[in-house]
Amino acid sequence: MKARVQHPQVKPRKDRKGWPWVFRYWSDEIQPDGTIKTFRKYQALAPSKGDNAITKKQAEVERDKFLAKLNASTVEAAVEQVAATGVALFGEVAKMYKDGYLSRESQISKPTRDKETFYVDEYIIPTWGALRLNQLQPKAVEDWLHGTFDSWWTMHGVRAIMSRIYHYAEGHGLWEEGKRNPPSKAKIGRKRYKRERRILSFDETARVLARLDFTIRLIIEICIATSARISEVLGLIWMRVNLDAGTIKIEQRVWHQEVGRPKSEDSKRTLGVGDLVDRLRVKATEDGAAPDAFVFQQKRAPGRPLWDSGVRDALHQAAAAEGCDFPGLGPHSFRRANITWRQQVGGSAIEASKIAGHSDLEMTSEYTFVTAERQNELTRRIQEKLAEAASKRDGKSEPPAQPAPAAPDVPPNLAETKPVTTVLQ
């Protein structure tokens, strides 16, 4: 590497249209074998004659802006400049990302660490590890994603991991700051779902619940009442259950029998259980309810939380018996159902988002289903308004007047309003 500060003369090139201002400069470029080779190059700036022409002083300003990225007064600065152009091996940066960012247990939950580590080790490094950061091409990444993975969500997740590796490189001076990385330019198409997106109706849900035993039914009803994730419900301990206030506090979750922090900081929240308080009180009495004991424990291994697979199996069996089973049915289906139903019975999208522990409303919209029944209900309201307007226009008898309200039409206070969870139940 050479230290150099270039200040070449700007001249008009008269053999080109518009006599563009040009200058020559030295450029150090990385070669496939890792060596650095110096090239002498021309750089055109703007026309000196005709449309969009600029003066020589303006051309010198543009020259200085261009060379600011190349000039280096010391060898160390030259090395940093070349490093920032992306000559580091992608595989080495990926290992730095894994050993650094992904190793921080206090910042990232174990499921996320395990998932990203799997894709980095099994797919990303074997395919792209031998290339340098500046050698990855968006089209190549795009073709690889579509040829390797069937799921849109998997492609989206793997592309995001690769982008985070570039952000990590940027933070360590190995990629130019603010420069868009190649994986982020890869197109994965419109969002699509591998399984049918649906939820059970109120009637189907009631029939399925009637077939479940006390414990499994209580778990599912907590999912329905609170929109909690199954991992959060199974990670619940009695000290986080407030029977007097009718709430549960989400502070941890269970994943593959390992207790860990919730999925995100927004997932730490207090949730109302409504009419389930009495049944939780009965269970607390039957179980002895030690403060640090899990609310839902294995019968064969007391003290250990239930496996979510057992809950799913029981749910599928009950749904199959009622003729409403489908491949994507699980406790998470009732999380989606709660978010949908909570808005149908009067809750706002913001309330549904906060209760679900989502970081933004966009994710809440992904969980919200507008059922055919709800669509018909809203459509009929529109049709009734149109029919009423048509009736007035045609001179037909008007609908009977509504009785005047006994009190001013003002929003009720919280004490006079039923909680949304109670209405839902």
Image (tube, rainbow, N blue to C red):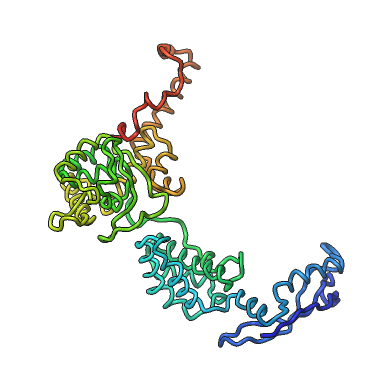
- Which residue is drawn at the image coordinates 46% and 45% (left, top)? 361
| In the image: residue 205, left or right of residue 119 | left
Q: In the rendered image, which quarter contains the N terminus?
A: bottom right
- Which residue is drawn at the image coordinates 85% and 74% (left, top)? 12
Residue 33: quadrant of the picture: bottom right
Q: In the rendered image, which quarter contains the C terminus?
A: top left
- Which residue is drawn at the image coordinates 25% and 60% (left, top)? 257
Q: Residue furthest front?
A: 291
* Nearer to us in this view, 399 or 397: 399
Q: Position of residue 397 (x, y in %)?
A: 43, 11
| In the image: residue 43, left or right of residue 137 | right
* Nearer to us in this view, 208 or 168: 168
Q: Position of residue 275 (x, y in %)?
A: 25, 34
| In the image: residue 331, left or right of residue 25 | left
User: Is 42 located above or below residue 112 in the figure?
Assistant: below
Q: Position of residue 59 (x, y in %)?
A: 82, 69
| Total numbered badges shown on the rendered structure | 0
Q: Position of residue 183 (x, y in %)?
A: 51, 67
| In the image: residue 122, left or right of residue 57 | left
User: Is 202 located above or below residue 304 in the figure?
Assistant: above
Residue 26: quadrant of the picture: bottom right
- Which residue is drawn at the image coordinates 19% and 40% (left, top)? 207
* Nearer to us in this view, 156 or 220: 220
